Image: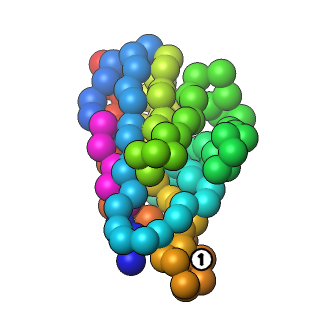
Amino acid sequence: QVQLVESGGGLVQPGGSLRLSCAASGSNFRLGAMNWYRQAPGKERELVAAITVGGSTNYADSVKGRFTISRDNAKNTVYLQMNSLIPEDTAVYYCNAAAAVYGTRWNIYWGQGTQVTVSS
C-alpha cells in the first residue's frame, strides 16, 4: 500500500504565494506520474498540474504562468508552487499518483487534501 500526505495549505491574500507538498510513503513501491487536482465548493474536481517521472509537465490553462509543479524522486515528493494567487484558486487541493508495489499492478492513489483559501 502507498500513502500520500499533503501539506502546505492555508489562508493567503490575493497576490500571495503558497507551496504545497505531497509525500508518498510505503514499502517497496515505485511512483509514476504525479498530479495535483483541486475541488472548489459546488464544482467538480479538476486537474491543475501533472508531472511525469522524467519531469515533463502539463498545466490547466487557468494556472499557466502562475503555478509550477516539480518533484524530487529521491524523496518521493511532488510540489506545487503557487504564485499570484487569486480568489478563484480557493479549493481543496489533492495529490494523486500512479504507484505500484513491487510485484503488483499499478494503482492510483489519492491524498486526503489540503485547503487553500485566497481571501483578503
| Residue 56 spot, x, y in % from top left | 72, 41
Q: Which amino acid does label 1 sit on?
A: Trp
Task: Say which residue label 1 marks.
Answer: 106
| Residue 40 spot, x, y in % from top left | 45, 49
Q: Is residue 37 above or below residue 31?
A: above
Q: Which colour scheme is used?
A: rainbow
Q: Magenta stretch?
A: 4-8
What residue is shown at x 27% (from left), y 30% (from top)?
11
Extreme residue toward the bottom, this view: 104
Q: Classify residue 74 as left or right of residue 31.
A: left
Q: Can residue 18 be seen in this view?
A: yes
Q: Classify residue 47 as left or right of residue 93.
A: right
Categorize mark 1 by other alpha carbons within 10 Å: few (<14), some (14-19), many (20+): some
What residue is shown at x 56% (from left), y 35% (from top)?
69
- Under circle 1, the secondary element is loop
Q: Is residue 38 visible?
A: no
Q: Is residue 91 above or below residue 62?
A: below
Location of the N terminus by quadrant is: bottom left
